Amino acid sequence: MNKLIVKNLFFLFTLLFFAGCKKNLEEKIYGNANDTNFWETEGDFKIAINSAYGRLGTPWKGFSLWQFAIEDLSTDYGYGGYSDSRPYSSYTGWSSSNPQSIDWGLWSYLWQGVSYCNKIIDKAESANIPEDAKGRFIAEAKALRAFTYFNLVNWFGGVPLVTSSVEVPLSIPRATAAETYALIERDLSEAIELLPSKSTLVAAGEREYGRLTKGGAQGLLARAYLQQKKWSEVEKMSSDIIASREYRLIEDYTNIFSLANEGFKNEEILWSLAFGGMQNGVRINGMYLQVYLYKAPGYPAYSSYSSWGGNMAVSNEFYESFSADDERRKLLVREYRDQSGATRISNPVMMIKYPEDLTNSDKEISSTDYIVVRYADVLLMRAEALNELGRLDDAIEVLNEVRERADLPELETADFDKISLSNHIYKERRWELYFEGHGKRDMTRFGTLLEHIKKVSADAGDDPERYLLLPLPTSALSANPALKQNPGFK
């Protein structure tokens, strides 16, 4: 399989250096790339778009690790920390400079991705390349920019909106969350009109798995609508995705994440970040979650990975919340046989959702792809919207599709009202999507996050609301005088 990010290995960071980005780019919020001897051929734009994707999967940065720390470990089902055995402590003593991971591992890489996308859009407009290629590059860049802004607005609130690579001012005030979402919706709507469908690419012999398609952009737009509680828009977008017949629930839940099932053949995936792991002894990019997964003594899984952290797990309470017959619980391990054959209990509960990469691992990195949007999420988004629109029968029908794959009995409309069904959909999302980067966002939307913060934070005090958003890093505040810190942080 020729994954997008694996292809052009030595060009992955070409744009960063070749285009003349400033030496201290990571300390700046917004970087501009020079144009000398670049942006002339379709190949140049392919290097550029690969670099934009690459910002999301940079080793140890972006979505290779921090997505899990922010969206999963900070929830009431996540247990542990990314580097020690304590329960996740992001809601205690979290200042703008502690932990530094926001600064060096996340913030700058998201903004570098925005900068790359802006440059691609600006340069493609007048480029002398085929029109179909031009449209696709512009659409991908807009969809990637929207995805990046979606994460920024959910994690940090309204942020500066930068949509041009020309004369970007150094002092840019924050836009509101509503203004940020308006840009996200516009970018994704325009991308949907230009991006090819998955089936079109497969029919044409496309080999660069990992590039965004129409369905991927539709899934991202449905997610943006969902977080704003625009229920009618969620219903319409999910209906369009279903009507395309491009995607379906695959039969075996445990096979969704299988290394052998990656690529276009996995009909459940709308978009994945294609991680390459190692190639010819050289690190490309990869999933770093496995390094930090909790490994109970004597349990053989993930034995090829280092044990630097080894502490990401799920809580016993979350494990107990599953029905005993739920197929999705098979990827959580509480009782196991160690290497001597003795039966032991794992505390906390181990997670084997993401498979061990025995062929590509250097004891730190895995080629396991990061699934951004899959069909089960589309169905659950649709069920949530239908319920909020008062269509309980339709919501339960969609929900039962997901439950059937999990080998669970059908739900009956007579057993629910709007509120109780909403509560069940919340649980169903957690059972289906745990450790896939949805947790904190779901808790925010369903209104359960604040109580969790009060419970786990030693310093929530009279201002627990400050922990609903992440603090802006010190480097960002220094680089942009117009940027104001989130309330409650120094």
Image (cartoon, rainbow, N blue to C red):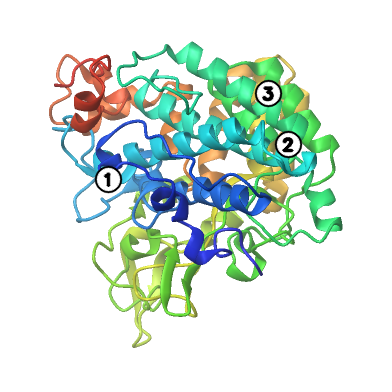
Disc 3 is placed on an element classified as: helix
Quadrant housing the N terminus: bottom right
Instruction: In the displayed orientation, state which residue is furthest to the bottom.
Output: 340
- Give the Cα separation between the discs numbered 2 and 3: 26 Å
Q: Quadrant of residue 324?
A: bottom right
Quadrant housing the C terminus: top left
Residue at the location (65% across, 67% down)? 2
Disc 3 marks a residue whose amino acid type is: Val
Disc 2 marks a residue whose amino acid type is: Gly
Disc 1 target residue: 23
Residue at the location (40% across, 54% down)? 58
Question: Badges 1 and 2: C-beta atoms under 8 Å apart?
Answer: no
x, y percentage for residue 119? 52, 35
Disc 2 target residue: 135
- Disc nearer the start of the sequence (1/3): 1
Q: Is residue 173 visible?
A: yes
Question: 10 Å neighbourhood of mark 3: few (<14), some, or many (≥20)?
Answer: many
Disc 1 marks a residue whose amino acid type is: Lys
Disc 3 target residue: 234
Position of residue 167 in the picture relative to residue 41 (left or right): left
Question: Badges 2 and 3: C-beta atoms under 8 Å apart?
Answer: no
User: Measured along the vertical axis of the image, is residue 51 above or below residue 364?
Assistant: above
Q: Nearer the viewer, residue 403 or 249?
A: 249
Position of residue 51 in the picture relative to residue 95 (left or right): right
- Give the Cα separation between the discs numbered 1 and 2: 32 Å
Position of residue 205 in the picture relative to residue 176 (left or right): right
- Disc nearer the start of the sequence (1/2): 1
x, y percentage for residue 355? 50, 68
